[in-house]
Image: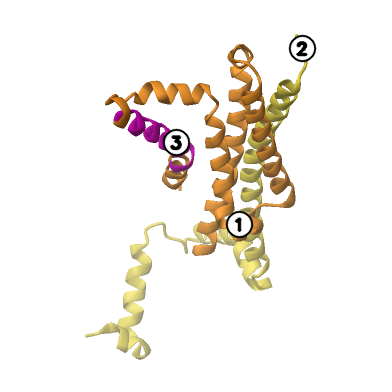
Amino acid sequence: MIRQLFMWFLANAILPILVPVICLCVASWLYDGSFPFVEDFIALLEKGFYIFSALALIFSLFEESEKFRLCANAYEGMIIAGAILVTCIMFYLIETKDDQYIKTHVGQFLIIWFASAFYAGYLKYKLLKFNKSTKS
Amino acid sequence: MNFDTLNILTIISCILIVYTVFMMFRDKRVTKLKVDMTSQKVEEALSDYDKVVKRTAGIERERQKNTGQHHDDETFYLNRAEVIRSKTNFFSFVNGN
């Protein structure tokens, strides 16, 4: 189950950042032959792309919405909707505020990201446990 | 320091992290309680005679030890069963000889 959780995290938290980075790298490779993977990765993280990984983690829970309804109660559904709202507000702030503001408040942004991802991980663990108990 | 939207969101996130950790421990405790309740239900499903036998098993073993009926070496019981099987017609199909 831990392996499944790890693979889920890898797929939903890393891929939303990796895919645009690879697309940008391929575009720049076609344009001038360079492949700035690390630079683009850091640039996108500074632009606030880690929000998409938190959102992907939350939205991946709704792939199994039928089981999610059975194993999570109404409060947890409400909190996860609130987490979506909070991450969207965070993205709005990153887009509208200037770079200096984002650099000084990066710790707070990371706390918000961690809270969303941690709660999504907790619910995914409950979902996997529920799947395991119903399978046997 | 200005208190803006980001600070409110950060406080909400911190509360969420604490709540999640609390719920993880609570889930663990509730699971343990459920397991205990299941064993309790199994206990309740026993008949009165079984309950008495189960609860007085320790006393019965002590009594047997004091009167010399109990043997810690289980080969004693195996040998006795072997003797019973060999001498009783009812167990002839088990014997195989």
State which chain disc 2 sits on.
Answer: B
Residue farthest left in this picture: B97
State which chain disc 3 sits on.
Answer: A
Residue that badge 2 annotates: B2
**Chain in orange in the render:** A
Residue that badge 3 annotates: A14
User: In x, y percent, where is residue A29?
Assistant: 30, 29
| Mark 3 to mark 1 CA distance (whole Å) | 22 Å
| Mark 1 to mark 2 CA distance (whole Å) | 40 Å
Any magenta on residue A28?
yes
Q: Secondary structure at mark 3?
A: helix
What's the mark number on residue A15? Answer: none
Earlier residue among tags 3 and 1: 3
Residue farthest front in this picture: A31
Residue that badge 1 annotates: A65
| Mark 1 burial class by Cα count in 10 Å: few <14, some 14-19, many 20+ | some
| Mark 2 burial class by Cα count in 10 Å: few <14, some 14-19, many 20+ | few
Residue under the point 35% across and 65% down: B76
Which residue range is magenta in the image?
A11-29
Q: Secondary structure at mark 2?
A: loop
Q: Secondary structure at mark 1?
A: helix
Q: How many marks?
A: 3
User: Quadrant of residue B14 in the image?
Assistant: top right
Q: Looking at numbered disc 3 in the image, what kind of residue is underneath it?
A: Ile
